[in-house]
Image (cartoon, rainbow, N blue to C red):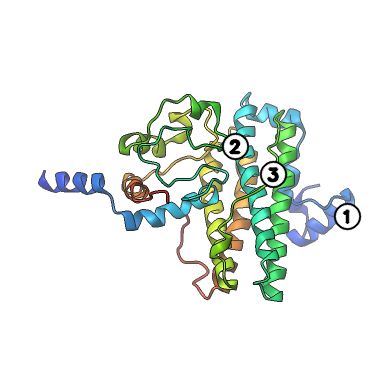
Amino acid sequence: MSFFAFSSPLVARRAFLGKSGLALSGTAIALLAGRDVLAAKAGGSTAADAGILNTALAAELEAVAAYQVGAESGLLEKPVLALAGQFQGHHREHADVLAKTIRQLGGKPVDAKQKYDFPTRGLKNQADVLRFAASLEKGAVSAYLGAVPLFRNRDLSKAAASILGDEAMHWAVLRNALGENPVPSAFVS
Amino acid sequence: MLEGAVLLAALALGDARAGEEVYSRCLGCHALDYDRTGPKHCGLLGRRAGSVPGYEYSPAMKRSGIVWSEKTLERFLADPVNTVPGTTMTYAGVPDPADRSNLIAYLKKQRCE
């Protein structure tokens, strides 16, 4: 069954999820393709691709921890706290899928650090937390942008670009919450 | 001819203020004064690669023999993965020479407290 056979992507997605019983995004499904498929497409470069994914995983795990610091700071108003929780959930989903994919490529996913250093002394109010989160999200967008062309397996490039899109949306929403232009330029770098 | 020489000199000097904006690209993994997914960047110039105490570097970076200078940073930032094969800085690099020059000028000013 092709997604093109449905009247809209939403209908297609509902039908697909209904039939498969999966609650995974298209990206997650692409990332979690069978190891043989991933290995074959990587052309024997699975270790290099797993290494790229592991760097991304380390950053995603740190992002989960950073949002936790923000959530526990007591500085966020309720709607912002809910938003932070949602974004943290996205990073957790990214991390889970990246870790599974690394395993499927024969690699060993990095673990979350026991302790992360964050500039907590500089976080005095909600705007400080939002600005800190926005800087991390902007950096994450750049990091994925720099990783996308490196994958040997083009499916992994596509999947990384999908995560990049999600994190760019986080960045834009956080800028908007700060009263800044949410989309300051036509390109990201 | 003179114009080209002026341009080259400007690139060599770099603009630290413009470099701060370029550095925002690094903030997914790095910070100036504490280790993250990547090591901290304060005091980078003159430091031996792979030498920040407590940071777990790739074996490739530790044995690279690089000492960070304008020249070595210029080369590494242009193409990290091929300059130090095996580095965990799996990033395609900063393609624009002016951006690299500005970034290096910014990093040069960042001293550890």
Q: Residue B77's x, y, as percent?
A: 41, 39
Crowding near the residue tagged with mark 1, few <14, some 14–19, many ≥20 C-alpha atoms within 10 Å: few
x 70%, y 75%: residue: A79
x 57%, y 44%: residue: B37
Visible residue check, residue A189: no
Residue where numbered disc 2 is placed = A52
Chain of the residue under the numbered disc 1 shown in the image: A
Q: Earlier in the sequence, mark 1 or mark 3?
A: 1
- Indicate left or right for A130 with A25 as reference: left
Residues tagged by mark 1 and mark 2 found on one chain of the structure? yes
* Residue type at the position of mark 3: Ala
Chain of the residue under the numbered disc 2 shown in the image: A
Check residue A112 in the rendering and tell me which mark sits there, or answer none: 3
Check residue A188 in the rendering and tell me which mark sits there, or answer none: none
Q: Determine contact: label 1, label 3, CB under 8 Å.
A: no
Residue where numbered disc 1 is placed = A18
Residues tagged by mark 2 and mark 3 found on one chain of the structure? yes
Residues tagged by mark 1 and mark 3 found on one chain of the structure? yes
Number of labels in the image equals 3
- Indicate left or right for B4 with B67 as reference: left
Query: Which of the pair A107/A65 is nearer the observer?
Result: A65
Q: Secondary structure at mark 1?
A: helix
* Residue type at the position of mark 2: Ile
Q: Secondary structure at mark 2?
A: helix
Front tag of 1 and 3: 3
* Residue type at the position of mark 1: Gly
Query: Which of the pair B53/A72 is nearer the observer?
Result: B53
Front tag of 2 and 3: 3
